[in-house]
């Protein structure tokens, strides 16, 4: 059975947080900060500044809490095979496809 809510980006344990992550939230298991770049759905190690959003200034410490306005909880599921990134919804995929052909 998949765990519900936010999973810790560091150890993968369920945090019990389902709605909103604050700057003070940390994982009870490993004490990692949860509202940080590594716990955000926009984090992408291959992107410029390791973020899929167009941020003004890079955030140097990706594992520490920050005040980024783009932060959104990472969509991940912990199942029998480990942690997997949840895929976008059908509407999000369709919107992305339609954007490819805009003039």
Image (tube, rainbow, N blue to C red):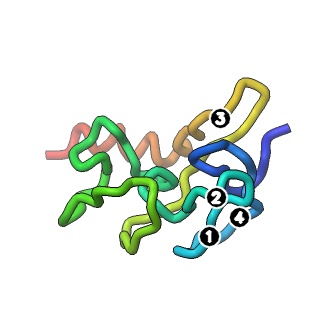
| Residue 46 rendering spot, x and y as whole percentages | 29, 35
Q: Quadrant of residue 77?
A: top right
Question: Residue 33: x percent and y percent?
Answer: 55, 61
Mark 2 or 4: the one toward you: 2
Residue that carries the numbered disc 2 in the rendered image: 31
Distance CA(mark 2)–CA(mark 1): 9 Å
Badges 2 and 3: C-beta atoms under 8 Å apart? no
The residue pinned by badge 3 equals 83
Q: Secondary structure at mark 3?
A: strand
Q: Nearer the viewer, mark 2 or mark 3?
A: 2
Mark 2 or mark 3: whose residue is earlier in sequence: 2
Q: Residues within 10 Å of mark 2 (few under 14, many from 20)?
A: few
Q: Earlier in the sequence, mark 3 or mark 4?
A: 4
What residue is shown with label 4? Answer: 18
Decide: is 98 above or below 57: above
Q: CA distance from mark 2 to mark 3?
A: 19 Å
Residue that extends furthest to the right in the rendered view of this protein:
1
**Distance (Cα) linking label 2 and label 4:** 18 Å
Q: Nearer the viewer, residue 9 or 97?
A: 9
Q: Are marks 2 and 4 in contact (CB under 8 Å)?
A: no
SS label for mark 1: loop
Structural distance between the alpha carbons of marks 1 and 3? 20 Å
């Amino acid at each position: 059975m998949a765990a519900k809510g936010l999973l810790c980006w560091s150890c993968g344990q369920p945090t019990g947080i389902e709605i909103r992550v604050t700057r003070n939230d940390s994982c009870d298991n490993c004490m990692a900060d949860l509202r940080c770049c590594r716990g955000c759905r926009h984090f992408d190690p291959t992107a410029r500044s390791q973020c899929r959003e167009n941020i003004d200034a890079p955030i140097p410490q990706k594992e520490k809490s920050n005040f980024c306005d783009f932060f959104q909880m990472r969509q991940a599921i912990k199942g029998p095979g480990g942690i997997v990134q949840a895929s976008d919804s059908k509407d999000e995929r369709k919107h992305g496809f339609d954007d490819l052909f805009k003039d």
